[in-house]
Image (cartoon, helix red, strand yellow):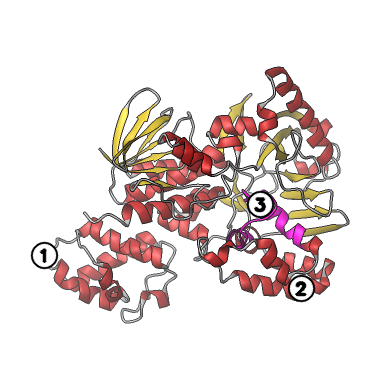
Amino acid sequence: MYDAIIIGAGMSGLAAGIRLALFEKRVAILERHAVPGGLNSFYRLRGRDYDVGLHAVTNFRPKGSRQGPLVRLLRQLRLRWDDLGLAPQAGSSIVFPGARLDFSNDFDLLRSEVGRHFPRQSDNLERLVAHLAGYGELAEPAAQCPAREVVGRFLDDPLLVEMLFCPLLFYGAAHEGDMPFGQFSVLFRSIYLEGLGRPREGIRRILAALGEKFRQLGGELRLRAGVDRIVVRDGRAEGVVLDDGTELTARSVLSSAGWRETMRLCGERQLADQRPAGRMSFVESISVLDRQPKDLGFDRTTIFFCDSERLPYCRPEGLAEPRCGLVCSPNNFLYDEPLGEGILRIAVPANYDRWAALGPEAYRREKSRWHDAMIAAAARFVPGLPDAAIDHDTFTPVTIRRFTGHDEGAVYGIPHKQYDGATHLENLFLCGADQGLVGIVGAAISGIAMANRHVLGRDEG
Amino acid sequence: MTPAEIQEAILDILSGIAPDEDLSHLQPEVPFRDQLEIDSMDFLDIVMELRKRYRVRIPEEDYPALASMASTVKYLEPLMKDVAKGK
């Protein structure tokens, strides 16, 4: 019998596993796929590794910092700053009609940009930032108030509000267009007050660091071990049955599969349907270039663009939404050495249902069409892009669903989070995107917190 | 374990939990939280490490006794006098 079984070897599952193994719990992480990572994984195509999910790690603070979620993550997982090999972003931009705001890992830049372009809002921004500091716990009732309502009490320029929301939505919002103020506070801190970083080697570096730590501590990581169902008896999870019929028993089960997905694993279809799937997914095109993106005039880390004054961050009616999105280059981080090849990623919101309804021929055709449409949308930021591209790949909400198992390819999970990680079973818990925090750091913190609280904390024996 | 050995054990645990902190000038009478950047999650790890390494159980109501190095050593002395010096 295991002390704990963890479903999913994404960031939250791996982090939870490390916490349990650290305190001598017998723990197995079960991952359906051949590679770990889940929503932050990678795949290999024509000799190259492509990161899925990771554009950047949030909560970046320089080495030597002793505060903040990244430091907490490193300490709790007994990792060193160098283990993740993070380099800071070069700098990003938010581009709306007639306005552009640059930001970097130094919040003073955004402050001065707001001062320049929205001078009447400078003091308002300071008051908003001061107000954010009061929101530590996502689950607090005060943190549930819609963010637009709260932010609107401080900033009275609607364009500035849209622009500031834009990166936070694209890099963390399960909700369409708004979010609980607690989440806004977390994301504002993660992206603006702290910052963005990336390992030169991409997500593989982070997955390797966590996977190795887990194994060193005696944890068992089983890949190609999909869970078919959770065995339930008398209000308790007794264990799981794998796709190949193997039965494993455990004292606790911690699932990062998602709330709906986990309820279905328990045979609880009705419970699963009580919370709708997340509606936010994306189509993303990754282009490999024959030169560095900055040689094409693209020197920003990420450009968040929107072609209207109001940001349509929602599930589009059609297959995808070309009027807003982001253009990101993994090259534009301050590495010791540049990347070997130029890479450009373009992502726009996409409608899972529409993509899922396409037959194979139409699917291929639409992928190609949307790749071209996204290249065209990015052209104003990266002139000459089509000519410099030597290869590309495109993935859709359907791809995300297929490789992560998350309903409708919802990259930030369902909007209705289960902040306490509890379920209808006394020893089954959730971690990951549907528990509350998303992104690489968010998911890891989720796994850590849920393991601490529900498996380590409750251990009386 | 002697008080000196207990102190060394605590320092060892602290250096594992917060390797980036400078422990060389740690003042025994001053609360840890006033000298180091450690939070409640780190603190719980200290408690769990003590249990893991030395099988010492500390009930939650006794946590305030672990505020500083001096108070921690004093609290642990009777609990650890028969424990062998650590790893």
Which residue has dot 1 on it? B82
Q: Can residue A391 be seen here?
A: yes
- Chain where mark 1 sits: B
The answer as to whether the residues below labels 1 and 2 share one chain is no
Sequence-earlier tag: 3 or 2: 2
Residue furthest to the top: A361
Which residue has dot 2 on it? A122
Q: Position of residue B39 (x, y in %)?
A: 42, 68
- Between circles 3 and 2, the one closer to the viewer is 2
State the extent of the magenta-drawn residues as a range. Answer: A161-188
- Chain where mark 2 sits: A
| Amino acid type, callout 1 | Asp
Q: CA distance from mark 1 to mark 3?
A: 53 Å
| Amino acid type, callout 3 | Leu
Q: CA distance from mark 3 to mark 2?
A: 29 Å
| Amino acid type, callout 2 | Ser
Helix, strand or loop at mark 3: loop
